Image: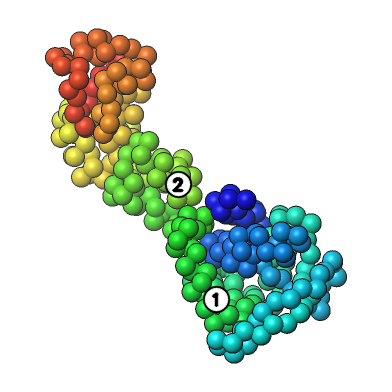
Amino acid sequence: MEKQEFIEKIAGYVKKYAPSYGILVYSPIIAQAILESGWGESVLASSYHNYFGLKCGSSWTGKSVNLTTKEEYQPGTLTTIKDNFRVFDSMEDGVKGYFEFIQNPRYANLKGIKDPETYLKAIKSDGYATSSTYVENNMNLVHVYNLTAYDVPNKSIDEIAKEVIRGVYGNGEQRRQALTSLGYDYDTVQARVRELLNTSNGKTVQEVAKDVIAGKYGNGTERRERLSAAGYDPDEVQAEVNRILGAVQYYTVQSGDTLSGIAKRYGTSVENLSKMNGIQNPNLIFTSQTLRVK
């Protein structure tokens, strides 16, 4: 199995089971699976689906296997021992088994942790591993393979919505992709953005759209700048302007746009767009330029 495929499979099961066990960070657990199982290629992992080196202990009543392992009871000194390890029927069972394992009261402090290094330090301190470099080795995997991309979002919807208003995530599709990649629901964030804008500025998006139609915010780049300065999302307002105007629709040129691409998107032709907007050279349009498309 390729490394990225292994990461994706482990991450999928971690995401599936972690929330129900009160675990809010995923990257250190994915790293543990990589480290403990040697990317799933150790005998314990490949033959017995135990990806975390889980020993039986006194509470385990399931299947087991006796294998040789090494422990670092003294820093820098490895001791070879034989012990009984838990056996699972599949990768999914093995990942679920990890969460069942850390239900032991001594691991109760792991619940609610959102920082990967804090999680690893806590579980090491709880006695999960004997390696003196356990935290460092796992954090190296977290960084090298960007495992934090699988973590639960750490910011509240209000925090993200305020960042959206400040322009942190751009506009339109760029914003949607940025928020989605961070694990947030775009529509939920946008709804909160609208609430904050309506509350903080005294006017609803609908009211501001009517002001735009009345010419109070100017056109093109000037309009976008003035709306942004007032705390409104120019694209949100423009969408409402388009809705109010009905048949008339406008589009703000984004970086990388071409007139032919815009024409295709709105079911029209380059010739029509050029006529409606007085464009002399169809190959020359500018970012933030507002075009009538219908």
The residue labelled by disc 1 is: 134
Q: Tell me whether circle 1 and circle 2 mark residues in contact (CB < 8 Å).
A: no
In the picture, the disc for residue 181 is 2
Residue 128 % position (x, y) = 64, 77
Q: Residue at x 66, y 85 (%)?
A: 79
Q: Is residue 292 left or right of residue 175?
A: left
Q: Is residue 101 above or below residue 14?
A: below
The amino acid type, in three-letter code, at marker 1 is Tyr
Residue 200 visible, this angle: no
Q: Is residue 243 above or below residue 180?
A: above
- On the image, the x and y values in percent for residue 62 come to 84, 67
Residue 172 located left or right of residue 288: right
Which residue is pictured at 45% across the width and 47% down the height?
181
Quarter location, residue 267: top left
Q: Is residue 286 visible?
A: yes
Q: In the image shown, does 156 or 90 lie closer to the viewer?
A: 90
Label 2 CA crowd tier, 10 Å (few <14, some 14–19, many 20+): few
Q: Which mark is residue 179?
A: none
Q: Earlier in the sequence, mark 1 or mark 2?
A: 1
